[in-house]
Amino acid sequence: MEQSNIILLTVYGDDKPGVTASITEILGKYKASILDIGQADIHHSLALGILFKMDDTVQGPVLKDILFKAYEIGVKIRFTPISVERYNQWVMRQGKERYVVTILGRIITATQLSMVTAAIAELGLNIDSIKRLTGRPPLDISSIDNLRSCVELSIRGDVPDKKALSAKFMEISASQGIDISFQKDDMYRRTRRLICFDMDSTLIKTEVIDELADRAGVGKKVRKITESAMRGEIDFKESFTRRVALLKGLDESVMRDIAENLPIMDGAERLMSVLKKSGFKIAILSGGFTYFGEYLRQKFGVDYVYANNLEIEDGKLTGRYLGDIVDGKRKAELLGLIAQVENIELEQVIAVGDGANDLPMLNMAGLGIAFHAKPKVKANASQSISTIGLDGILYFLGFRDVHIDS
């Protein structure tokens, strides 16, 4: 086997300022070429790796000087010679696909992590890095309502059957009570620019039509139709027409009262704040009603609102609607139109929803997320969040708490 003057230097010990500078200064003195470098800090414990190449004539002095410097600054080191063959194998791996696996939940246990990493290993995939996106949890978590934990794994390799791996992750997610996102790590993941939300049971914690129905005294009838539609058992247009007809005679003032007291979904305000700061375009594409979408537009600075208009005459709902119904097909069309207007690729679009009528836009977007969705919707969406609030989307995008809350 051909040998070379390639050395993998591993440095470990208590983290302190100047360790990397001290080591690289010596390498620079002897004109060594750095081929790779990586560093991690876990609870002030340093792990630094430097892969470098040097001339044979200076190998002894380089290693000697690094040993003395390591003793001086109080860290431990290890030198590992690397063959040309092994190095070339690493170089060839650079051409393999990269993916990101995000594990999200209130807490993440060793069992959960072992199941996810075992599924990755079974396919011969290599984990390049692991990082925590959320802050460190306190030891006593019993009193924390918004507890969240997220770990991101960067993996590399060829995945012959992505659907099979996604199905395995879904199985683990269901049995372990965690959310697992599996995404290709490409330029689009890092350049998302448009996010399209369903409204009812996504941005808000209720179905507004059910709230209106309660005020009209027809709550049970409307909910029965709503549940059937959300399960995909009946056509959305038919269910919408039947439900709106039951609202006939309701006073317009009821809509204003409901709008002023809409229960906002957990994590929505945190999510919207970060999205606006990050320059996202935000759209609401809803099978609900424009009246309430406009309220959310003002609250969150939403850029686009497309929903259904209720007909009102003499201050009363007529039981009819105006214009075309925004159903699942229309949501997907609107997503495409907004992306076109904003000159945004579909791969840069995120769609979020919970019902069967959201599936067309979830499957059209580069990142479709089923949020606290029905089983049929989760099974047909590429990603899902069921364990925490809407701000969990930020972790799927790679945001870290240190950036979100700064």
Image: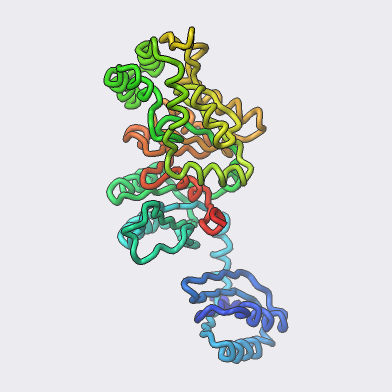
The picture quadrant where one finds residue 402 is bottom right
385 on left or right of 50 = left
**Could you tell me residue 19's position as x and y percent?**
60, 80
Identify the residue shown where x is 58% and y is 72%: 84
**Could you tell me residue 120's position as x and y percent?**
39, 55
Which colour style is shown? rainbow
21 on left or right of 39 = right
188 on left or right of 28 = left
The front one of 33 and 111 is 111
The picture quadrant where one finds residue 255 is top left
Q: Is residue 249 above or below residue 304?
A: above
Identify the residue shown where x is 39% and y is 45%: 166
**Could you tell me residue 189's position as x and y percent?**
56, 46
Q: Is residue 194 above or below residue 71?
A: above
The front one of 320 and 55 is 320
31 on left or right of 73 = right
**Can residue 320 be seen here?**
yes
Identify the residue shown where x is 42% and y is 35%: 263
**Can residue 10 be seen here?**
no
**Could you tell me residue 156's position as x and y percent?**
49, 56
Numbered-mark total = 0
The front one of 322 and 45 is 322
Query: Which of the image's four quarters has the C terminus?
Result: bottom right
Q: Is residue 207 above or below residue 18?
A: above
The picture quadrant where one finds residue 355 is top left
Identify the residue shown where x is 37% and y is 39%: 372
